[in-house]
Image (cartoon, rainbow, N blue to C red):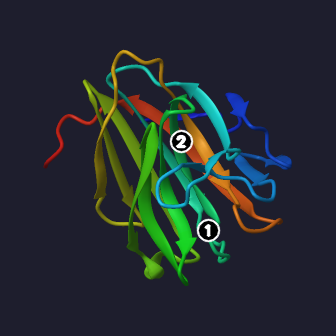
Amino acid sequence: MQPQPIASGTWLNPPLLIEQQGNKLFVTAKENSDFWRTTSYGFVHDSGHGLLNEFPQDSSVELTWLLNYREQFDQAGLLVWANDENWTKAGIEFADGAPQLGAVVTKTVSDWSVAPVPEWMGREVQLRVSRSGDALTIRARCEGDWKLVRLAPLDPALDWKVGLHLASPSRAGLTVEFLELKTGLADESLHD
């Protein structure tokens, strides 16, 4: 994996505030920002923030950030984006009193998978997305070994972009400290 400039890319929905300090990027979300399509809630939100770059076939992206947010639905991680009906966001979302490791996969409508990771609070989190064939492999860790988060379909005919994301559906004032962005080759296999 090769380090990349953390502030490079084009913003999908620019955030409220961006401040770079050395290699760190502090990003403040706009109030009521989110990505979601229809399922259960009945609304469509395309207002979350993503700093996107090209995501070619057979490549991967890793992001490291500090998990220090504690308000309902605050979220950060990686966004894999083709258009407003085809995207995946993965990372840590604070929900129901705990940080939740998960992903939202959207193809016309969204689905959501989560698993609580309260022991990750206040620590550096790493998330990795790997694109190969018709699949997106999502892994995460907080020190130690990578955990498989999700294996999701990814239409190879679409033009995909990827980058850091954050959103704050319920409040103002969420600032996320992004620490490192790396790119490299796709994972060699789903299983070790």
Write down the quadrant of residue 140 in the picture: bottom left
Say which residue label 2 marks: 79
The amino acid type found where label 1 is placed reads: Phe
Toward the left, the furthest residue is 192
Horizontal relation, residue 131 to residue 158: left or right: left
Residue at 14%, 48% in the rendered image: 191
Percent position (x, y) of residue 188?
20, 34
Say which mark, if any, is on residue 73. 1
- Kind of element beneath mark 2: strand
Q: CA distance from mark 1 to mark 2?
A: 16 Å
**Near-viewer residue (2 or 77):** 77
**Near-viewer residue (27 or 151):** 151
Residue at 61%, 52% in the rendered image: 43
The amino acid type found where label 2 is placed reads: Leu
Quadrant showing the N terminus: top left
**Near-viewer residue (56 or 107):** 107
Question: Does 18 appear above or below 3?
Answer: below
Percent position (x, y) of residue 144?
33, 66
Badge 2: residue crowd in 10 Å (few <14, some 14–19, many ≥20): many
Horizontal relation, residue 37 to residue 156: left or right: right
Badge 1: residue crowd in 10 Å (few <14, some 14–19, many ≥20): many
Mark closest to the chain's N terminus, 1 or 2: 1
Write down the quadrant of residue 177 in the picture: bottom right
Percent position (x, y) of residue 86?
47, 32
